[in-house]
Image: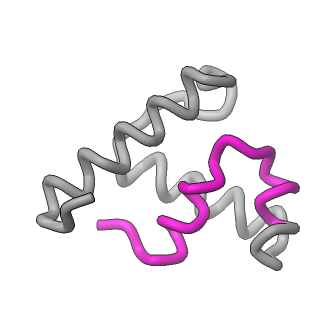
Protein backbone atom coordinates (compact mmCIF):
# COMPACT_ATOMS: atom_id res chain seq x y z
CA UNK A 1 0.00 0.00 0.00
CA UNK A 2 1.32 3.46 -0.87
CA UNK A 3 1.67 6.12 1.79
CA UNK A 4 0.20 9.60 1.22
CA UNK A 5 3.72 10.92 0.53
CA UNK A 6 4.36 8.14 -1.99
CA UNK A 7 1.09 9.04 -3.75
CA UNK A 8 2.25 12.67 -3.86
CA UNK A 9 5.55 11.68 -5.43
CA UNK A 10 3.84 9.25 -7.84
CA UNK A 11 1.47 12.01 -8.98
CA UNK A 12 4.54 14.00 -10.06
CA UNK A 13 6.50 11.05 -11.44
CA UNK A 14 6.44 12.43 -14.98
CA UNK A 15 8.77 15.20 -13.79
CA UNK A 16 12.48 14.79 -13.25
CA UNK A 17 13.45 13.92 -9.64
CA UNK A 18 15.03 17.35 -9.11
CA UNK A 19 11.75 19.00 -10.19
CA UNK A 20 9.73 16.79 -7.84
CA UNK A 21 12.15 17.62 -5.01
CA UNK A 22 11.74 21.33 -5.62
CA UNK A 23 7.93 21.07 -5.82
CA UNK A 24 7.64 19.08 -2.59
CA UNK A 25 10.48 20.68 -0.63
CA UNK A 26 12.44 17.44 -0.40
CA UNK A 27 15.99 16.48 -1.30
CA UNK A 28 16.54 14.81 -4.65
CA UNK A 29 17.89 11.73 -2.85
CA UNK A 30 14.70 11.49 -0.78
CA UNK A 31 12.59 11.76 -3.94
CA UNK A 32 14.62 9.02 -5.63
CA UNK A 33 14.10 6.80 -2.57
CA UNK A 34 10.35 7.45 -2.66
CA UNK A 35 10.25 6.71 -6.39
CA UNK A 36 12.11 3.43 -5.85
CA UNK A 37 9.59 2.51 -3.14
CA UNK A 38 6.63 3.44 -5.38
CA UNK A 39 8.00 1.39 -8.27
CA UNK A 40 8.57 -1.58 -5.94
CA UNK A 41 5.05 -1.39 -4.47
CA UNK A 42 3.55 -1.07 -7.97
CA UNK A 43 5.78 -3.87 -9.31
CA UNK A 44 7.29 -1.70 -12.05
CA UNK A 45 10.69 -2.83 -13.31
CA UNK A 46 13.51 -0.83 -14.93
CA UNK A 47 11.62 2.35 -14.12
CA UNK A 48 13.65 5.46 -14.88
CA UNK A 49 15.58 4.30 -17.92
CA UNK A 50 12.77 2.37 -19.59
CA UNK A 51 9.77 4.57 -18.86
CA UNK A 52 9.86 7.85 -20.74
CA UNK A 53 7.39 10.49 -21.84
CA UNK A 54 3.79 9.43 -22.35
CA UNK A 55 4.53 5.75 -21.85
CA UNK A 56 5.97 6.44 -18.40
CA UNK A 57 3.09 8.71 -17.38
CA UNK A 58 0.44 6.28 -18.64
CA UNK A 59 2.04 3.26 -16.99
CA UNK A 60 2.44 4.99 -13.63
CA UNK A 61 -1.12 6.34 -13.72
CA UNK A 62 -2.49 2.91 -14.56
CA UNK A 63 -0.40 1.21 -11.88
CA UNK A 64 -1.52 3.71 -9.21
CA UNK A 65 -5.19 3.22 -10.17
CA UNK A 66 -4.86 -0.56 -10.12
CA UNK A 67 -3.09 -0.40 -6.76
CA UNK A 68 -5.91 1.73 -5.33
CA UNK A 69 -8.56 -0.65 -6.67
CA UNK A 70 -6.77 -3.69 -5.26
CA UNK A 71 -6.56 -2.03 -1.86
CA UNK A 72 -10.19 -0.89 -1.81
CA UNK A 73 -9.36 2.79 -2.10
CA UNK A 74 -11.39 3.56 -5.22
CA UNK A 75 -10.10 6.27 -7.53
Q: Is residue 19 left or right of residue 50?
A: right
Residue 56: where, in percent of width, then height?
57, 29
Which of the 4 image quadrants contains residue 9? bottom right
Q: Is residue 17 above or below residue 29?
A: above
Residue 3: where, in percent of width, then height?
41, 75
Q: Main secondary structure of the magenta part?
A: helix
Residue 71 vs residue 45, the one in the foreground: 71
- Residue in the picture at 55% in, 28% down: 46
Residue 1 vs residue 40, the one in the foreground: 1
Which of the 4 image quadrants contains residue 22? bottom right
Q: Look at the image and give the residue range highlighted in magenta.
A: 1-21
Residue 18 vs residue 32, the one in the foreground: 18
Q: Is residue 32 above or below residue 8?
A: above
| Residue that lies at the very extreme toward the front in this rendered image | 75
Q: Is residue 70 left or right of residue 7?
A: left
Q: Is residue 61 above or below residue 31?
A: above
Q: What colouring does the structure picture have?
A: one colour
* Number of callouts: 0
- Residue in the picture at 35% in, 41% down: 63
Residue 20: where, in percent of width, then height?
77, 59
- Residue in the picture at 65% in, 54% down: 12
Residue 3, magenta (yes or no): yes
- Residue in the picture at 73% in, 69% down: 30
Residue 56, magenta (yes or no): no
Q: Quadrant of the C terminus?
A: bottom left
Q: Quadrant of the N terminus?
A: bottom left
Which of the 4 image quadrants contains residue 14? top right
Amino acid sequence: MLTPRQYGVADLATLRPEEIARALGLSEKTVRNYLDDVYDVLHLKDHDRELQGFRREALITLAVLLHRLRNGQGS
